[in-house]
Amino acid sequence: MDPYLTVDRPLGVTYLDYNATAPLRAEALAAMVQVLETVGNASSQHAYGVEAANHVATARRRVADLLGCSAGELIFTAGATEANNLALHATYRGRRIVVGASEHPAILETAHACAPGNVVVAPVSRDGAVDTVAAAAALATGDVDVVSIMAANNETGVLSDLSAIVELAHAAGAVVHTDATQLVGKLPIDLGELDVDLLSLSAHKFGGPQGVGALFVRRSLRLAPRPLLHGGGHERGWRAGTANVAGIVGMGAAALEAKARCSLEAEHSRQLRDRLEKSLLAAVPGSSVNGSTRPRLPGVTSMTFADTPADAVLAAMPTVAASDGSACHSGALGPSHVLTAMGLSRTEAESTIRFSLGYATTEADVDHVIQAVPAAVAHVRNALRPVVKMSSRVNESRSILPMSNTSTDR
Ligand code: PMP
């Protein structure tokens, strides 16, 4: 890969948590700095305002280009959470909402808040795909307003068969929304072909800044805005508040790069992910990959290391930044709802680590993780192994302390 893709690792820690947030692309940073050094509210009529509005218009075209839609079909938001909220609130008409069991909380919780008692959760199968038979059964009653199924899962990377869902939903008169936060910028998408009605995305998952995203609303849907924030009528009445010009410009610059480099970067990620996965499967007894039988995002692997708590493994390898579930839930207790929906037991879910990598990941990063994980898993397993005390013959566990760094140092 090009040298510009090398990001600093100021903490000396290998970053494999792209699904939580990806490093800012150099082009996005440069474009944002340029805007931040000037003044201008995109709604002002004077020269500075016009300049800011031009920046926003350029970014809108760039994001539209990445998605294969027209610029007028995009509403800028403060991220995918807001886009998801807007989408469900605007399309729910008092009947039912169908969502997949492995959706992000930004959909699951929004659906329940928006349509209490009227949410149908379609199960996912062991391989992580939404059960289309169950979705079809829910749709057969003909009283569904909107179906929301994610394009790619944030924990496993499993891709949904959106074309099949669209066909089923449209035949039943329902609108289709997809949370494409994890797919946009990582795999090609063309809204000229994929007939979803609404789509959410977030800049920080493909090299733009955090706190900015967009909602695509297909023009032919003629959907009336249902703003969540009231005030000035920005974004064609969908969202009040001064446009985040620098953030939007950063997203536009990231979209331009992601579009130009999508296939190259996908191949880069896939090759590194496959090597990581294969090496860890060979090196760690009792390891398995969740969702591996389905088409997946190229840069993510969800690996279960049997009977080995993931939080202890991560604590035992402080030079690796990965996630024991979705970073959005960190701090919340309990196993990942995505993995349990796939049929993993609580213990299996809690023994699972998500490694997600991307455009700036290097071979050396992967080499490091391939070394660190088996040692950390062995350390935790060893610490948990019951020991027989010669004196009392009582079982106890050794304490799980972070191991010395020698074997995990780069
Ligand atoms: N949906 C999915 C699938 C996600 O992975 C995330 C972020 N983890 C979100 C929605 C929320 O995105 P944002 O941070 O832009 O609000």
Image (tube, rainbow, N blue to C red):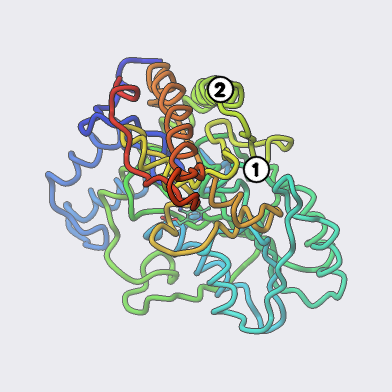
Whether residue 218 is visible here, answered yes or no, is no
Q: Which residue is mark 2?
A: 283
Mark 1, Cα crowd under 10 Å, few <14 / some 14-19 / many 20+, is many
14 relative to 44 in the view: left or right: right
Mark 2, Cα crowd under 10 Å, few <14 / some 14-19 / many 20+, is some
At 50% from the left edge and 76% from the top edge, which residue is drawn? 226
Q: Answer with the quarter of the image where residue 3 lies.
A: top left
39 relative to 248 in the view: left or right: left
SS at mark 1 in the image: loop
Reply above or below: 143 against 298: below
Seen from the viewer's position, the closer of residues 3 and 166 is: 3
| Pair 2/1: label in front | 2
Label of residue 158 in the image: 1
SS at mark 2 in the image: helix
Residue 251 in picture, x, y percent from top left: 36, 44
Residue 115 in picture, x, y percent from top left: 62, 81
Q: Amino acid at mark 1?
A: Val
At 48% from the left edge and 34% from the top edge, which residue is drawn? 377
Reply above or below: 354 against 239: above
Q: CA distance from mark 2 to mark 1?
A: 24 Å
At 49% from the left edge and 47% from the top edge, which residue is drawn? 309
At 51% from the left edge and 49% from the top edge, which residue is drawn? 181
Whether residue 15 is visible here, answered yes or no, is yes
Label of residue 135 in the image: none
Which image quadrant: the C terminus? top left
Reply above or below: 72 against 91: above
